[in-house]
């Protein structure tokens, strides 16, 4: 295969950064997939004198590992690491050659302390924008600890394996042959699952913060940057950096930026945060907040952080429809991300629940892969923007069903049918579908705050024009609040407002 000029130009820059010689230890046959992988490896090897190819035998064909001469790195790719996984391939190449991964020392220490063998396998789709985070995290763990190994498996070339294991969502991670994790995961989350949570003792020496931000999405990131720029002691408690925006592929309404993608945008936000002296505590979930002499934020691991002010920016998550079968078949046909999981339903019939912008965008996306797409809308008409509805109406493999109340999702070991009720006639109907994509809006992540701050009937945090809650010194921002509009740009604005409100409170206290 011939890599296009843009990819080759990018590769040339990175190959010049190789610290030492590397070997592609490849297992290849005579099939079409092996030919593609062979051509890919040969083309890259021709671009650098530090790269050689060696034929080996391994359990999957086609596959290859990236090693130093005479050493095994534990990092392997089964299939072609193109699409979103091309960056994973480049980073693995550099890290195996000797370039250190860009993670903090405390995290490296925890990874190196694992003293038992762990073999991870991650099934991916090349269109999945969440998969590279997981692949890159596990590759870093393998680079740092010789007891850990990791193989990325591209579902398109190993479809029989995908079907045999009944994998219906990506990324799906197996550890030593048993299903370990599914969906977007950070390196902190994967490490916690594999080796246990961070000890609360690691937080014992934290000093009193001026501002402590809880949440790592656009609102939390904006709040942290605005606070840090004031020169005050700023901390962040972050379960997953990026928040809900990591699920958003195309963003065309970020003023001044005609097009970007959620993961790219939030990487830029994180890099911006890192320009300042912000104490970012990743992989941590807050479970309580209270005010004594100062504000105390208690984490799930039992640690208690103290701060003069706090900004709650916990965001929101996809809303569930709460019908029988939704929970039971999650990642077994029930999905929430068409970009990630759509390719697994190629040639199959699927349903999309939700007629807003997210639902119709998903239906348009899925129509290019699925045999047929049913759109179920609870109301008498779709709620999506007219431009999206017009695009949908041009597709002949999409059926829109309004007045539809989903009753049940059924199947054996995966989704096989969806039953809905027509709200006009009370008639009950069944669709033979193998996938159900649920996109009916967002639900604020505020359950832990119910007895602490004032919430409205939608469980959103009630704030004033300064972003202040009913608790003195506690502010809130973003999709977890009662803001009228839930947009990335409005979340960033409310984060800035809350930080300025917190700073104003500090100088007046």
Image (cartoon, grey):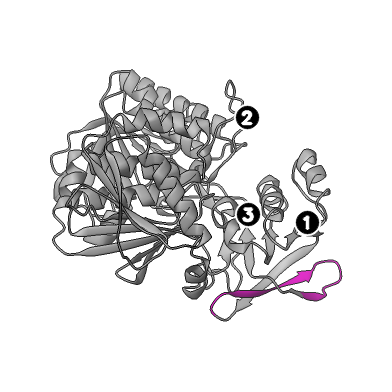
69 vs 11, nearest the viewer = 69
> Could you tell me which residue is drawn at 49 percent across and 52 percent down?
36
Give the total number of marks visible in the rendering. 3
Residue under label 2: 253
List x then y, in percent, for residue 12.
Answer: 39, 30
Q: Residue at x 45, y 35 (%)?
A: 266
Circle nearer the N terminus (3, 2): 2
Q: Which residues are magenta?
A: 413-429
Q: Residues within 10 Å of mark 2 (few under 14, many from 20)?
A: few
Front residue of 226 and 309: 226
Q: Find numbered disc 2 in the image and state the secondary structure of the residue it sits on.
A: loop
Helix, strand or loop at label 1? It is loop
Give the CA separation, mark 2 to mark 1.
Answer: 27 Å
Mark 2 or mark 1, which has the lower sequence index? Answer: 2
Compared across the picture, whether 264 is left or right of 301 comes to right
Q: Mark 1 vs mark 3: which is more N-terminal?
A: 1
Q: Secondary structure at mark 3?
A: loop
Instruction: Using residue 301 as the reference point, say whether residue 410 is left or right of it.
Output: right
Is residue 420 in the magenta section?
yes
Q: Which residue is mark 1?
A: 379
Answer with left or right where residue 302 lies relative to residue 170: left
Which residue is under mark 3? 439
């Amino acid at each position: 295969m011939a890599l296009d000029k843009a990819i080759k130009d990018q590769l040339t820059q990175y190959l010049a950064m190789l610290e030492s010689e590397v070997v592609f230890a490849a297992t290849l046959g005579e099939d079409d997939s092996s030919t593609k992988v062979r051509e890919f490896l040969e083309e890259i090897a021709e671009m650098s004198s530090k790269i050689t190819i060696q034929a080996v035998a391994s359990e999957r064909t086609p596959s290859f590992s990236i090693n130093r001469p005479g050493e095994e790195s534990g990092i392997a790719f089964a299939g072609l690491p193109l699409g979103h996984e091309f960056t994973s391939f480049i980073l693995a190449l550099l890290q195996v050659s000797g370039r250190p991964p860009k993670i903090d020392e405390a995290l490296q220490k925890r990874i190196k302390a694992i003293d038992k063998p762990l073999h991870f396998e991650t099934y991916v789709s090349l269109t999945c924008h969440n998969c590279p985070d997981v692949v890159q995290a596990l590759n870093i763990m393998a680079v740092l600890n010789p007891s850990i190994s990791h193989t990325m498996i591209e579902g398109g070339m190993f479809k029989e394996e995908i079907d045999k294991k009944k994998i219906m969502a990506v990324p799906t991670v197996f550890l030593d042959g048993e299903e370990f994790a599914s969906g977007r995961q950070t390196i902190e989350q994967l490490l916690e699952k594999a080796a246990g949570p961070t000890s609360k003792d690691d937080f014992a020496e934290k000093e009193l913060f001026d501002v402590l931000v809880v949440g790592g999405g656009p609102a939390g990131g904006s709040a942290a940057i605005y606070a840090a720029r004031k020169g005050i002691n700023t901390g962040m408690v972050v379960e997953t950096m990026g928040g809900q925006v990591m699920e958003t592929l195309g963003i065309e309404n970020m003023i001044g930026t005609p097009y970007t993608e959620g993961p790219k945008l939030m990487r830029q936000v994180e890099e911006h945060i890192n320009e300042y002296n912000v104490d970012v505590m990743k992989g941590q979930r807050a479970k309580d907040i209270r005010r004594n002499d100062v504000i105390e934020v208690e984490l799930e691991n039992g640690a208690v952080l103290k701060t003069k002010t706090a900004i709650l920016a916990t965001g929101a998550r996809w809303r569930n429809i709460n019908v029988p079968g939704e929970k039971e078949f999650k990642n077994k046909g029930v999905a929430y991300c068409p970009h990630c999981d759509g390719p697994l339903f190629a040639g199959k019939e699927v349903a999309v629940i939700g007629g807003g912008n997210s639902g119709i965008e998903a239906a348009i996306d899925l129509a290019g892969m699925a045999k047929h797409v049913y759109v179920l809308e609870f109301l008498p008409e779709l709620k999506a923007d007219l431009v999206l509805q017009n695009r949908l109406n041009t597709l002949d493999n999409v059926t829109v069903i309004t007045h539809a109340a989903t009753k049940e999702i059924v199947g054996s070991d995966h989704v096989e049918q969806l039953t809905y009720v027509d709200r006009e006639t009370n008639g009950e109907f069944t669709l033979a579908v193998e996938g159900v994509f649920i996109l009916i809006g967002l639900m604020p992540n505020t359950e832990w705050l119910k007895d602490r701050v004032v919430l409205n009937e939608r469980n959103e945090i009630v704030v004033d024009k300064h972003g202040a809650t009913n608790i003195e010194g506690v502010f809130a921002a973003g999709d977890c609040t009662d803001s009228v509009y839930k947009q990335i740009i409005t979340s960033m604005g409310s984060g800035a407002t809350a930080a300025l409100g917190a700073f104003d409170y500090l100088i007046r206290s």
